Image (spheres, rainbow, N blue to C red):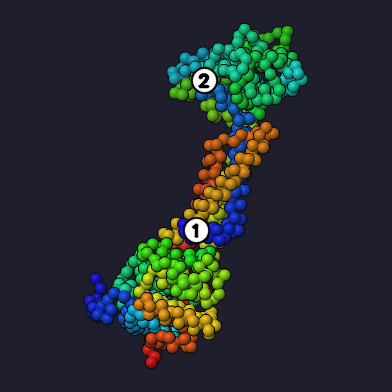
């Protein structure tokens, strides 16, 4: 590392430029990672935080819109509950509504209809849980609180006029398709689902309709259960794709990230290729002086590693700093794990790119050291 | 292991240090383009002896240095450096020999741009093996005590060449191979550099071979050989 460090110091302008490029890519990676996690949270955090392991939708439903199109008979809940390996099964309803609070706050809500007392009924941070005694009481996401909704507010659903009363708030972000989640007792959900407002007659079938059966049980045989209950199951993680825009958003970001990794590795590789070619004469001299090839390779790789680690470190620090400024204005959430993975990948791929370049050292003939600049 | 005759003959001349070349041939190229870069070259350089090799370009002077320095393996013949036969040594062993027993002085110094004069001298020690001499002491010896912190671009041509000589002497080699050391220098500087080489050769008991075009500096050498078309002959 003797030579590596001396050269880094001596040619600091040149290495600094290269480091700046890598650092900028690292900044971009951190922001993309935050955006990616933020979008995932916005899209499916409401689903992620459900204790279910799979959803049984209507047979033959389009997967991409299963949460909005599927209608399942409540009989399927009993059928699923009896299956081996199923710990619990509960009815689950989902519908998107536009609402307005008494204070005039306009808010879109993803109404998650669950039976009060079922395993899906969430614990609250403040206020009360769902209860059959308060059919219009809802429990809302923390993000709805951030939007100005508070316990005791009444939210009136547009067009049908149903009034819901906020009785409790959830401890963290529960959103679905970029919309705040509100848990509502199943019976009320079923009325809203068929569009029955206050005073309207509710058809009998409404109380038999749910969106899906939320199944809990890691060892449940989904295919066999589907045959018995006449449903079509998606594991929880697979059901994320059924959230509006989820797969398109994540796929786009992943593509950008993959390209950035590739660009970073190639840029670092190209830089060290040019550097190694420029150093050809001095490498020849050192090999003639008896420098072992392993020494020269280790030295060059150590140089790349130091440069990358410093650049990525600076880039991540700047990215996290910028990210903390973004918070609130866009779906953005930094996760230590995701940032660390991105940083490690940048360094690793950079070293791989540099390795390809510095292997040229082995091809330098020490004989070229003789005869001066010939 | 080695041809008994040549080795014993070589050993009798000098077994532990210096350079012994016996009947060395080096053919370059293949097919019809074979060139005899070295033809039956025999040369003995004893410790403390300063040998100059002159001759026209392309006569094989650089090839002789390459073979003596273990950079090229001759087609036939024996090359002993510090008593070890370069022609049968493996790649790793030849690299180790270059590191420990051979010092190279290149045209115009060939220093590493990023390193100060002092660090240039530390470098060969970093390559492993032998413990080196005190770089500052050695720099003082070549007259550069004041310039230890200077980098190559802050040194004159003559000074760079002095650093190159000091660097070659760091590991206390038994053979010093010098390639056109005065090619880029004026007459005054050239004379000083060759005087320095002659002094270091005697003081450190190194066997030194200097390839040169410069006939003005031959007065400092113990023996002078001329290389023509790959053949070496002594000039008296």
Q: Which of marks 2 and 1 is in front?
A: 1
Residue A159 location in percent, x, y? Answer: 75, 17
Residue B204 location in percent, x, y? Answer: 37, 76
Left or right: where does residue B110 sit relative to residue B65? Answer: right
- For residue A4, the mark is 1
The numbered mark, 2 or 1, whose residue comes first in the sequence reads 1
Front one among A156 and B154: B154
Q: Residues within 10 Å of mark 2 (few under 14, many from 20)?
A: many
- Image vertical order of residue A83 relative to residue A331, above or below: above
Using the rendered view, name the quadrant where residue B157 is placed.
bottom right
Evaluate whether label 2 is on the same chain as label 1: yes
- In space, the residues marked 2 and 1 are separated at their CA atoms by 59 Å
- Image vertical order of residue B127 relative to residue A56, above or below: below
Q: Residue at x 24, y 80 (%)?
A: B12
- For residue A215, the mark is 2
Letter of the chain that mark 2 sits on in the rendering = A
Using the rendered view, name the quadrant where residue A231 is placed.
top right
Check the image and name the residue furthest to the bottom: B236
Letter of the chain that mark 1 sits on in the rendering = A
Front one among B124 and A271: B124
């Amino acid at each position: 590392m003797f030579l590596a460090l001396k050269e880094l110091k001596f040619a600091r302008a040149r290495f600094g430029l290269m480091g700046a490029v890598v650092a900028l890519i690292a900044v971009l990676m951190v922001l993309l990672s935050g955006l990616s996690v933020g979008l995932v949270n916005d899209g499916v955090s409401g689903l992620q935080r459900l204790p279910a392991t799979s959803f049984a939708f209507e047979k033959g439903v389009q997967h991409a819109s299963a949460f909005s199109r599927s209608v399942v008979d409540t009989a399927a809940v009993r059928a699923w509950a009896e299956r081996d390996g199923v710990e619990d099964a509960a009815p689950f309803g989902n519908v998107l509504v536009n609402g307005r609070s008494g204070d005039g706050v306009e808010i879109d809500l993803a109404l998650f209809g669950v039976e009060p007392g079922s395993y899906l009924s969430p614990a609250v941070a403040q206020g009360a849980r769902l209860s059959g005694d308060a059919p219009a009481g809802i429990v809302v996401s923390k993000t709805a609180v951030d939007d100005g909704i508070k316990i005791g507010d009444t939210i009136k659903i547009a067009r049908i006029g149903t009034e819901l009363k906020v009785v409790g708030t959830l401890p963290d972000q529960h959103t679905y398709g970029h919309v705040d989640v509100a848990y509502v007792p199943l019976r009320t959900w079923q009325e809203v689902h068929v569009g029955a407002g206050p005073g309207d007659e509710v058809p009998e079938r409404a109380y038999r309709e749910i969106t899906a059966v939320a199944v809990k049980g890691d060892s449940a045989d989904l295919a066999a259960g589907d045959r018995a209950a006449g449903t079509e199951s998606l594991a929880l993680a697979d059901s994320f794709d059924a959230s509006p825009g989820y797969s398109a958003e994540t796929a786009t970001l992943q593509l950008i990230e993959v390209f950035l990794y590739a660009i970073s590795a190639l840029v670092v590789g190209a830089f060290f290729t040019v550097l190694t070619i420029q150093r050809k004469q001095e490498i020849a001299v050192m090999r003639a002086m008896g420098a072992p090839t392993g020494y020269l390779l280790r030295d060059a790789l150590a140089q790349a590693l130091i440069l990358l680690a410093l650049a990525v470190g600076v880039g991540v620090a700047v990215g996290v700093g910028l990210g903390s400024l973004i918070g609130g204005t866009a779906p953005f959430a930094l996760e230590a794990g995701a940032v660390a993975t991105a940083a490690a990948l940048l360094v690793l791929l950079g070293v791989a790119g540099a390795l390809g370049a510095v292997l040229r050292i082995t091809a330098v003939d020490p004989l070229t050291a003789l005869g001066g600049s010939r | 292991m080695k041809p008994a005759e040549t080795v014993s003959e070589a050993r009798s001349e000098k077994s532990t240090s210096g350079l012994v070349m016996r009947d060395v041939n080096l053919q370059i190229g293949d097919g019809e383009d074979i060139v005899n870069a070295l033809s039956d070259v025999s040369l003995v350089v004893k410790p403390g002896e300063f040998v100059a090799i002159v001759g026209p370009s392309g006569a094989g002077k650089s090839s002789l240095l390459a073979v003596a320095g273990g950079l090229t393996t001759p087609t036939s013949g024996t090359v002993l450096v510090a008593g070890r036969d370069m022609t049968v040594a493996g790649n790793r062993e030849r690299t180790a020999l270059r590191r420990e027993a051979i010092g190279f002085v290149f045209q115009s110094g060939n220093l590493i741009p990023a390193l100060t004069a002092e660090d240039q001298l530390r470098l060969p020690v970093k390559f492993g093996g032998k413990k080196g001499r005190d770089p500052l002491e050695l720099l003082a010896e070549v007259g550069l005590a004041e310039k230890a912190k200077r980098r190559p671009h802050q040194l004159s041509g003559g000074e760079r060449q002095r650093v190159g000589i000091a660097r070659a002497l760091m590991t206390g080699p038994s053979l010093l191979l010098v390639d056109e050391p005065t090619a880029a220098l004026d007459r005054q500087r050239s004379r000083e550099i060759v005087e320095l080489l002659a002094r270091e050769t005697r003081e450190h008991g190194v066997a030194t071979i200097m390839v040169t075009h410069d006939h003005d500096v031959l007065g400092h050498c113990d023996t002078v050989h001329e290389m023509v078309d790959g053949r070496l002959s002594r000039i008296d």
